[in-house]
Amino acid sequence: MSSSKKVRVTETVLRDGHQSLMATRMSTEDMLPIIEKMDDAGYFSLECWGGATFDSAIRYLNEDPWERLREIRKRAPKTKLQMLLRGQNLLGYRHYADDVVEKFVEKAIENGIDIFRIFDALNDVRNLTASLDAVKKYGGHAQLTICYTISEVHTTAYYVDLAQELEKMGADSICIKDMAGILTPFAAKELVTSLQKVLSVPLSVHTHATSGTSQMTYLMAAEAGADVIDTAISPFAEGTSQPPTETMAICLHEGGYETELTIPLLEEISDYFKPIRDKYLKEELLNPLMMGTDPKALIYQVPGGMLSNLLSQLKQAGATDKYEEVLKEVPRVRADLGYPPLVTPMSQMVGTQAVFNVLTQERYKMVPNEIKEYLRGAYGQAPAPIDEEFRKSIIGADEVIIDRPANHIEPEWDELKEELGELAKSDEDVLTYALFPQVGKSFLEKKYGNDFSGSTNNRKTTSPDTVIKISAIM
Ligand code: CO
């Protein structure tokens, strides 16, 4: 649905901007003073929750993510608040039972979320249904997402079919999500044009500036009729983040597009965030290298975050000389697995398998458990069929799930609540625990325990399992 010459803007500084540039470490304290101004600026929505914000808040910032959401909501009564939700994974790293999914959505709406951008790493729509149903039930806006990737099966026709299916399922809007920054300008033009021919709900486009094409991509998308684009206010723009809000707004206005944004207010918001960016630079939480441009993602069609992750895995193994070989192995592993989009968790799984294949000098001699689970169908359906001989060679005669994976998960809400015991002071607490059992529990212990007054801010420390989080690609 393309209204004439109108493009609205979602501001990402409160979520994807700082997640992409500095591992999601911006504190609530640094956000709140500017929210009222942001509420007046004319944004379509403020993306401010979900993705890695929840994990980071409890793990590094000793902050209650629910509290952050309520505080933002209080200061932004007019603008829609938006979150990123990983379908049946919610914000965690496994599939949850439907009762937990429903409770999470109910509480997210109650605490302030309007728009849920819901995606599944494999574009398996069955992994979206439980959250979609819950968003509808509790009166939210369900934006269903196409994870954009490039492969022989990910053709324009594939995306058109997928978008139509999402609309038929009840999507209130659709998002093209280019987590890797590989949606080039002319590809965007073709894709948006084709989708707009068949869609009657609004279309959002989300990209990253990593490879240097993002402003061109958005301009082409706008010309092709995109309804909403995602940008970050300039101090937290560019590099692995989104293109700058002010720049896009000025250029779109010049081209006769109405964005409803007020440029002087954007300037004030930008002026507010500049010293905050500088503070994080000084604390070395923000690495200036992240703000540069790296077109390698376009050459290898592998997200930038995944490239650096592969290199660090090889460094640990003392095998950086194998980098080129691993880069060649990535597309082969991806083909074996039916071309999954390289987004969390698939990017980590494919990357690790490629490293194993090269380092052991025998393909699939070592296979991570996650890959076995994937081949057992636990993550959902692969975009392209997987060769049965190959599957058998990895998982033998194990049974393969062919229906919706969450059908195999028993309700778990009551059990989780019971497990948490006295610390379960609210449903929100139970959800915090459900999403991140260890970190969530120790966060709640601090929150309700005696040591709460002590200095518990540990945002500079890293634990082994943060390696995956830091390189999370979304
Ligand atoms: Co993103």
Image (cartoon, grey):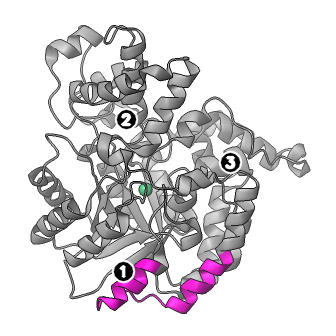
Q: Are marks 2 and 3 in contact (CB under 8 Å)?
A: no
For residue 331, side relative to residue 161 (left or right): right
Disc on res. 58: 3
The numbered mark, 1 or 2, whose residue comes first in the sequence reads: 1
Q: What is the secondary structure assignment of the residue under circle 2?
A: helix
Q: x and y percent of residue 362 in the render?
A: 33, 7
Disc 1 marks which residue? 8
Residue 428 visible in this rendered orientation of the protein: yes
The kind of residue on which mark 1 rests is: Arg
Q: State yes or no: residue 141 in magenta.
A: no
Q: State yes or no: residue 259 in magenta.
A: yes
Q: What is the secondary structure assignment of the residue under circle 3?
A: helix
Nearest the eye: 444 or 159: 159
State the count of labels: 3
Image region (quadrant) for ligand 1? bottom left
Q: Is residue 125 above or below residue 228?
A: above
Disc 2 marks which residue? 346
Q: What is the secondary structure assignment of the residue under circle 1?
A: strand
Tag 1: Cα neighbours inside 10 Å, few (<14), some, or many (≥20)?
A: many
Which residue is at a point 50% across and 52% down the rendered structure image?
A: 51
Residue 35 visible in this rendered orientation of the protein: no
Tag 3: Cα neighbours inside 10 Å, few (<14), some, or many (≥20)?
A: many
Q: x and y percent of residue 353 in the render?
A: 38, 21
For residue 155, side relative to residue 355 (left or right): left
Question: Which residues are the magenta region?
Answer: 247-272
The numbered mark, 2 or 3, whose residue comes first in the sequence reads: 3
Q: What's the magenta bit mostly, secondary-structure-wise?
A: helix
The kind of residue on which mark 3 rests is: Ile
Question: Where is residue 404, by image quadrant?
Answer: top left
Question: Where is residue 273, by image quadrant?
Answer: bottom right
Quadrant, the N terminus: bottom left
